[in-house]
């Protein structure tokens, strides 16, 4: 493998290319609409750049042109190719960039090469040569339609280069366009105005143009508009009339496919994304079923600012933009203090209708949150309608109460100035009333605490409440003490329980338990088990009294080890003798002159002696 890399590197150095350059990063195809044009006649050059799926997409297309040839563009559209290769599908993605060129004087011109950026590299296409002849020389050829590369034309449709008839029916001015942005078909997006204040309507219109005859829209995706509130004026193009429009000496079919009213909700440079549309018709080749000839509109950038601060009225909220009128109705006009009136405000106009109004503030007057009913829809290309807000207003002050007026400060983009919509509410006659009876009990937490005295003298002593008794304060004092005592009792109980467990698990207790098991074995006439338990009892007693684990010491050395741990020589001799007799009884069935009962009782004496010594 290493040798192969060295060979590739040597070949790369020999032929002046790098190993990375040996692998094509993109396939490039350059097309020109005509190689022989007249002075002043526009023609197009299209570069198609495709890369494999998973690699960097081509971007930043550019075209160099000689002096005397003006260039406009490019218009860029996304491309996708799916081919069957080796029994599997191969997907490629890329772009097509189309430039419109016009030559100013006759001659032969080498145009290009066009180029794109793929990853970190700049990749170029082919250079094309175009002959430019004098205007009116009569040699102007028909333009070959890129959708009909052989120039045969399609039945029922004129070739793209045919001159448009002079008696074309009238068509809307908004469909007029100076040049085709792409060959065969293209989308054109128009937004107006391009600079607005926050909340001002931006009207987006998208038009579709096709040079191969009538078409229908298919495989559509809407333009993105995340920073806008949108109202749809034209939802689709199915009911729109298809017009014939002259473009660059050719007859195209065109119609409006979308219209949206957009209201920006923040400031800055906001982007309206591209729309995708498939041209479906007899003369439009489709990349797949129901996809049509796919084209994209160009994204648009809208500059959104705040209206000026100079002259801004108090209470203005950014986004309240349009032209509005305000009216209101108040019922009833005469109430009792503590009752409420109904205020119905109706806001009408065009633009971004606000959701709330500025209510007047008066002492003793309470405005509750309104309920809202609205009818807002496009009216032509403008969005407008009405919004009705119904308030409940409670009045607690008696007399002639002036409710003031409802106001709405807003920015009028047509006049480029601020204005205030107002609705005067008038006065309400409020009769005195018993407000105490109208207020719920929870509104007066001190009600009933103090009563009115009707006679002079010492104040009478009221009934004792629970907190006036001594037992209440005694309980308050003893509660912490009880908590402390309960905690102490719990800790004492835990320590006592631990001591009992420790005692139960001590060596002495375990030795006594082993002696009990030995006596039980005697009753069963099991001499070997009795000897084993007696031995266990003695070993436990030795470990408890001296800390010596006697089982790990040889019998011949046990006497001296016990003596070194403070056990008397006589008691050490008894322990060694008893342990030897127990071994004999367990393994030979005979303990010499001693019976199994004597061994168990001897073990009990040793345990008692060791306990006293400990």
Image (cartoon, helix red, strand yellow):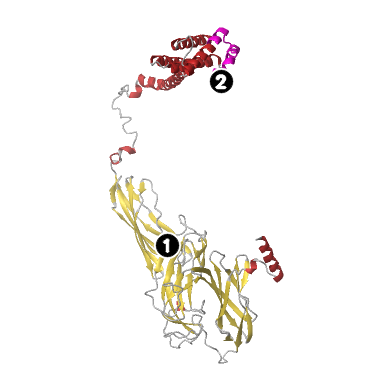
- For image coordinates 44% across by 18% down, the residue present is 529
Q: Quadrant of residue 597?
A: top left
Q: Quadrant of the N terminus?
A: bottom right
Distance in Å between CA atoms under marks 1 and 2: 98 Å
Residue occupying the far right of the picture = 14
Magenta-span inclusion, residue 556: yes
- The mark nearer the N terminus, 1 or 2, is 1
Task: Determine which of the numbered discs, if any, sits on residue 352 in the image.
Answer: 1
Of residues 50 and 490, the one nearer the viewer is: 50
Report the span colored magenta: 549-574
SS at circle 1:
loop
Residue 361 lies within the magenta run: no
Q: Which mark is residue 253?
A: none
Q: Is residue 272 left or right of residue 233?
A: right
Query: Is residue 6 shown above or below 533?
Result: below
* Circle 2: element type: helix
Query: Is residue 82 something that shows in the picture?
Result: no
Tell me the residue at 40%/79% (across/down).
242
Residue 435 in percent (x, y) is at 30, 41
Magenta region, main secondary structure: helix
Q: Which residue is mark 2?
A: 552
Locate residue 384, reporting x and y percent. Answer: 39, 65
């Amino acid at each position: 493998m290493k040798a192969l890399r060295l060979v590739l590197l040597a070949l790369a150095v020999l032929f002046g290319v790098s190993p990375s350059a040996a692998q094509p990063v993109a396939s490039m195809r350059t097309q020109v609409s005509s190689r022989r044009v007249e002075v002043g006649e526009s023609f197009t050059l299209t570069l198609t750049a495709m890369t494999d799926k998973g690699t960097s997409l081509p971007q930043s297309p550019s075209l160099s042109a000689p002096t005397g040839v003006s260039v406009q563009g490019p218009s860029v559209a996304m491309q996708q190719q799916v081919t069957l290769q080796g029994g599997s599908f191969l997907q490629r993605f890329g772009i097509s960039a189309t430039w419109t060129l016009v030559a100013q004087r006759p001659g032969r011109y080498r145009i290009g090469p066009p180029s794109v950026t793929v990853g970190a590299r700049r990749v170029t296409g082919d250079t094309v040569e175009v002959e430019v002849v004098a205007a009116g020389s009569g040699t102007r050829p028909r333009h070959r339609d890129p959708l009909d590369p052989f120039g045969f034309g399609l039945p029922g449709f004129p070739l793209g280069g045919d001159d448009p008839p002079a008696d074309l029916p009238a068509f809307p001015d908004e469909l007029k366009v100076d040049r085709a942005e792409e060959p065969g078909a293209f989308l054109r997006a128009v937004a107006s105005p391009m600079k607005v204040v926050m909340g001002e309507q931006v009207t987006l219109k998208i038009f579709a143009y096709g040079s191969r005859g009538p078409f229908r829209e298919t495989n559509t995706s809407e333009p993105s508009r995340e920073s806008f509130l949108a109202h749809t004026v034209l939802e689709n193009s199915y009911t729109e009339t298809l017009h014939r429009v002259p473009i660059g000496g050719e007859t195209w079919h065109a119609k409006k496919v979308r219209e949206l009213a957009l209201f920006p909700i923040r400031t800055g440079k906001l982007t309206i994304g591209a729309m995708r549309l498939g041209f479906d018709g007899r003369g439009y080749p489709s990349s797949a079923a129901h996809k049509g000839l796919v084209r994209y509109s160009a994204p648009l950038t809208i500059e959104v600012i705040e209206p000026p601060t100079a002259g801004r009225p108090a209470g203005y909220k950014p986004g309240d933009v349009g032209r509005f009128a305000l009216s209101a109705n108040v019922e009833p006009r005469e109430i009792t203090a503590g009752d409420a009136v109904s205020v119905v405000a109706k806001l009408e106009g065009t633009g971004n209708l606000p959701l709330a109004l500025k209510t007047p503030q008066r002492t003793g007057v309470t405005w509750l949150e309104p309920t809202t009913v609205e009818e807002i829809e496009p009216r032509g290309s403008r969005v407008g309608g009405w919004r009705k807000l119904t308030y409940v207003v409670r009045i607690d002050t008696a007399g002639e109460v002036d409710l003031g007026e409802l106001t709405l400060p807003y920015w009028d983009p047509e006049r480029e100035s601020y204005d205030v919509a107002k609705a005067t509410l008038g006065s309400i006659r409020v009769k005195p009333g018993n407000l105490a009876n109208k207020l719920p009990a929870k509104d007066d937490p001190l009600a009933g605490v103090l009563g009115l005295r009707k006679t002079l003298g010492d104040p009478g002593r009221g009934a004792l409440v629970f907190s006036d008794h001594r037992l209440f304060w005694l309980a308050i004092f003893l509660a912490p003490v009880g908590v402390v005592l309960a905690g102490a009792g719990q800790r004492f109980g835990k320590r006592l329980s631990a001591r009992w467990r420790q005692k139960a698990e001590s060596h002495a207790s375990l030795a006594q338990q082993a002696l009990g098991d030995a006596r039980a074995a005697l009753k069963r006439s099991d001499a070997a088990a009795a000897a084993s338990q007696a031995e266990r009892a003695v070993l436990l007693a030795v470990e408890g009294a001296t800390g010596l684990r006697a089982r790990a010491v040889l019998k011949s050395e046990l006497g001296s080890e016990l003596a070194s741990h403070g056990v008397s020589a006589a008691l050490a001799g008894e322990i060694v003798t008893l342990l030897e007799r127990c071994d004999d009884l367990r393994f030979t069935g005979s303990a010499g002159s001693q019976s199994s009962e004597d061994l168990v009782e001897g073990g009990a004496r040793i345990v008692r002696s060791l306990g006293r010594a400990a």
